Image (cartoon, rainbow, N blue to C red):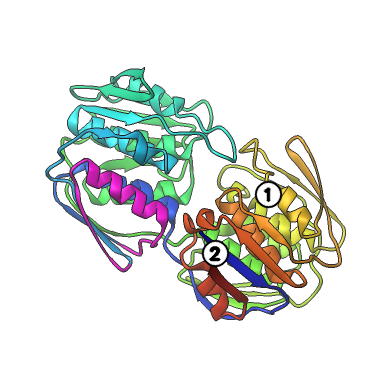
Amino acid sequence: MDIIVVEGGQRLSGTVAISGAKNAALPILASALLTGGECTYTNVPDLQDIRSILLLLESLGATTSADGNTVTIDAANLAASEAPYDLVRKMRASILVLCPLVARLGYARVSLPGGCAIGARPINLHLKGLERLGASIEIRHGYVEARASRLKGADIYFDTVTVTGTENIMMAAALAEGTTVLRNAAREPEVVALADVLVQMGADIQGAGTSVVTIQGVSQLKPTRAEIIPDRIEAGTFMAAAALTGGDVTLTNCRPDHLSAVCDKLQQAGINLDPKGTTLRVTADRPIESVDVRTQTYPGFPTDMQAQFMVLMSCAQGQSIIKETIFENRFIHVSELRRLGADITVSGDTAVVRGVKALWGAPVMASDLRASASLVLAGLVAEGVTQINRVYHIDRGYERIEEKLRQIGASIRREKA
């Protein structure tokens, strides 16, 4: 098993390219199931989650190939409609094959996703939406079985905002008969990216990026070629790294407009940002100021940046309050940050962070994807050496993070435990 070793104290400087967004790529790759023919996707990040969904698509009978950051999928000859537990348990996003299979084949049997360290993420909204489109749903022996001869358009209200739920039902509605209206839909850039790809395939979708999305179903979709949007969370993580180290880092291949809430909080903390098109220069030339944060659905401050921002506030002047409103267990990284010297007190969904003069290196354990990123960030500024275990978490969402950090001056390496 790999570990990441960070020697703190290096100022980051230089240019780093942001990879394609995992959370955009996963539903877009799943959408290839909606059509019979070869789809090609560029700027796909080389990550474990991407490899997992390609294995799942292959198990259904699709042919896939990857050449660097270009992935080709041909789902013309699907041979199965079951997503087995052994594959689904590795990644919750596997549920994204449910609706494309029902829409295309009329039947799907998909294992229920397992638990998640950061909190419960039930799929009941996916199932309710699919039922509203006319599918019959049964849950037996740990599997969801869904059937429909042809899905029918419907008016669907999501009780809570759900990104994957919006994406799943949007894919189903693209091939449904009639008009579907999704209300209280997720507004994330990844949802818009999926809608854009579906439109390229021939779907009729209006309103993506707003809370009301209207889909006029079509009888079939055609293969397409699409580029995956940049990863806004990876970009935010490198912005935090530059800020923590008093650095001067320019991000390329990024979308600053997808990071408005993060940019606003960083500027409040005293960080200088200079966006120009698809580049963003981040400079830090004065002490970090404390800023309060409340995570929210897009366009609010993303929960996926909460752990990284907590590290920044641990090194800020004064006290900040961080309120987590999305996932109930998303403070599990706090105990590890305390091992590095952070002063954090948690009560329910609120963390009080008091800035300290210095963090110190120590062995720590990653508990989830974003928690692992926060430990790497803390290691960049900690005195001495920080050893991060269970780095397979970080490999799920960051493409070659140690290489990218090394190229802008970090002392970081990957070793075998």
Quarter holding residue 319: bottom right
Q: Residue furthest front?
A: 417
Label 1 vs label 2, nearer the camera:
1
Taking depth in this image into account, of 171 and 340 the one nearest to the observer is 340
Mark drawn on residue 198: none
Rendering coords of residue 296 (x, y %): 62, 43
In reply to whether residue 65 is colored magenta, the answer given is: yes
Whole-number angstrom distance, CA of label 1 to CA of label 2: 20 Å
The residue beneath circle 1 is 333
Q: Is residue 216 visible?
A: no
Residues rendered magenta in the picture: 42-68
Query: In the picture provided, is 121 more to the left or to the right than 93?
Result: right
In this picture, is 270 found above or below 89? below
Mark drawn on residue 235: 2
Taking depth in this image into account, of 394 and 134 the one nearest to the observer is 394
Rendering coords of residue 244 (x, y %): 71, 69
Rendering coords of residue 80 (x, y %): 19, 35
Taking depth in this image into account, of 315 and 223 the one nearest to the observer is 315
In reply to whether residue 40 is colored magenta, the answer given is: no
In this picture, is 82 found above or below 221? above
- Kind of residue at disc 1: His
